[in-house]
Structures are given as structure tokens and as C-alpha cells.
Image (tube, rainbow, N blue to C red):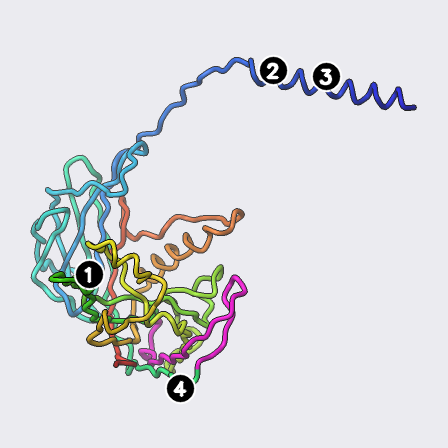
Amino acid sequence: MFILFKNRISGQLHLWQLVLCLLMFACTKSIELPFPNPQPLLVVNTLFSSDSTWKIHISSTSNLADTSFILPAVAHARIQLYENDSLIGSPQYAGNGNYRLDHYPVVGSTYRIKVEAAGFPSVEAVDSLPAHAINPGGTWFTDTAIPLVDEFGTAFTSFLMDVHFEDVPNEQNFYHVAIAMRDSCVCYFPSEDTTVVDPFNDRLWILETQIDEPFSDPNSKKANSVLLQDISFQNDEKHISFYMDTTTIFYAHFFPFPRKDSVDRDYYSTWVFSASTPRKYIRVYADVRSISETLYLYESSYFRQGFGTADPFYEFGNVYSNIKNGLGVFAGFQRQLVEIYSD
């Protein structure tokens, strides 16, 4: 019995030695595969609203072998813009793929864009401008911090914010809602004659919060925004609960420090603005946007791309585009910022 077992082991060892020899000395053969080189397409990106004139960006798709993250700008495009089928103008080139037209979109109007450029198929797209959400507002309940647990099982405390608005009546509507912060901090570090001013001074930031809504990120308990259809609250008022980590309001800005000792002071991990880094003010806003169905489809498909990054079995889909014969998005939206906290 022992001899039989020993011989079986010896045979298995010889087999593995043979396999290793084959792997070490096996020949390889390179096979050239045909590399697809499809016709380049125009990429049109325009988000328009009633409080801004037209800003249009035109670029093109690139070769699959191109590892650049920036699409090539198209400088000589011919653009025609229509409002309710009437030509309103031809946007003019302003550099870096950007085109401008001094005209303000009107709520309820339908807009069509047509773009032609040498070497590309002509493209066009249609969308309309939705109305603003009605009576947007918000309340920050700062009296009591609420205990929560994140996706890693770590306990943290948060502030509750209620954001609300009324649905535009008698039509199907879509919304994008988030919490934004404007932090006007002038940060400096004491030295003989050196003052460092925050280059992000007075910028608007979208905050990461926990949201009790189905179309925030299902793979995380935190997200930057939520997309909504008015199916469940048509012609009614909508309330959304946002939970913000109590340390979020004290986030330091990440920017290059010219002096090494400022980094040595552990500025990133304290989350506190001391007397050495005075802040002029901080303001928190309910960021309520009414968006067209086109923009809803685009953003929801874009969000789904991010949802699947942590799931190896996730089935990714293409990001939605309404550009006929091209790529990108041409869509209308309205944005309202309502202050819900300031100090």
C-alpha cells in the first residue's frame, strides 16, 4: 500500500516537471490582428439654460490607439442653431473647440443644432428647455447629530438636511438634486513675510452626502447627487433627506503648498480651520436642477458607468447620446441654488 502511494506521488511529480519544462521552453507565435479604424465622428456637447448665452463645444472621436484623455478640438465647424424651427444664428469659433452665440434660450422652446465639418458626417440634435422647479428650499437641522454607519461598517455622525421643491404641474419632469458648498477661506501660513492665499477661494463645491433615494449610487451609501422622475410626486411637493458627515464642512482644500512646513503641520488630517487659517465664511446650498429627459437619460447612463466599478459582474452600457450620426449631448436644464446654511 505504501509503495503504491509513493509511486503515485512520484508519477505526479514527473508530470509537473514535464509541464514546467514545456512552459519554460515553449515557442511563441505573434499573430497580427486587424486593428479597427472607424471613421471619426463629431462630438457635440452643449448644456443650455435661460440664464446663459449659448456655449457649444465641438470635438472629434480619436483613434483607438490614442491614449490621450482629451478629444481633438474641431476648429472649422459650420453650426446652425434653430429655435422652434427658425434660424437664430451661427455660433462663432472662440478657440479650443468652443463656439459662442449671443442669444438666451427661452423656457418651453425647442432647439435644434446642425453641425458640419470637413471629413466628418453631418450631425444634428434636438432638445427643449424645461421650466424651473417651483419654490425650492431646504432646512439644515444642526441641533442634533445623527449616528450612521458607512459601507465599511464605520460609525460616523451626520447632519440632516431636508431639500424640497414643487413639481411643475401637468407635464412629465426630471430633476437633479445635490448639496453644494461655497467656502471662501483665505488660508495662510505664518512666516517672516510669506502669505499663501487659497487659489480655490470662493469656488462652489458639490458635497458627498448620504441620500435616501433609489437613484443615488447603489454600491455606496454616499453619493454626490440624485436623479428623479416625478412619477411618484407629479403635481406635488417632493422632500429629499441628505445626511452630511459632520467633518465634511471642515474639509481643507487640496492645493500645492509652496512651503514644506505647511504640509508638516498635518493640515490634511486635522479637518479644522484654526486661527492660522482663517475662513471668511462658509455657505451651504440646496442645488436643485430641472433637466430635460435627454439630460436625465445621459446622466443616468453616465452614473451607471460609475455604479459598476466595484462589481466584476456588472453589465456596462453605452452612455446615452442624442447626437444623430455623432456623439455627445445637446440638452436643456435650469439650476437654482437656495442657501440653507451660512456662518
Locate residue 302, reporting x and y percent. Answer: 37, 55
Could you tell me if the residues under marks 2 and 1 are in contact, i.e. CB atoms within 8 Å? no
| Residue indicated by mark 4 | 143
- Cα–Cα gap, marks 3 and 1: 75 Å
Mark 3 or mark 1, earlier in chain:
3
Mark 1 or mark 4, earlier in chain:
1
Could you tell me if the residues under marks 3 and 2 are in contact, i.e. CB atoms within 8 Å? no
| Residue indicated by mark 2 | 22
Q: Quadrant of residue 190?
A: bottom left
Mark in front: 2 vs 1: 2
Q: Amino acid at mark 1?
A: Tyr
| Residue indicated by mark 3 | 14
Where does the C terminus fall, quadrant-wise? bottom left
Mark 3 or mark 2, earlier in chain:
3
Disc 4: CA contacts within 10 A as few (<14), some (14-19) or many (>=20): few
Where does the N terminus fall, quadrant-wise? top right
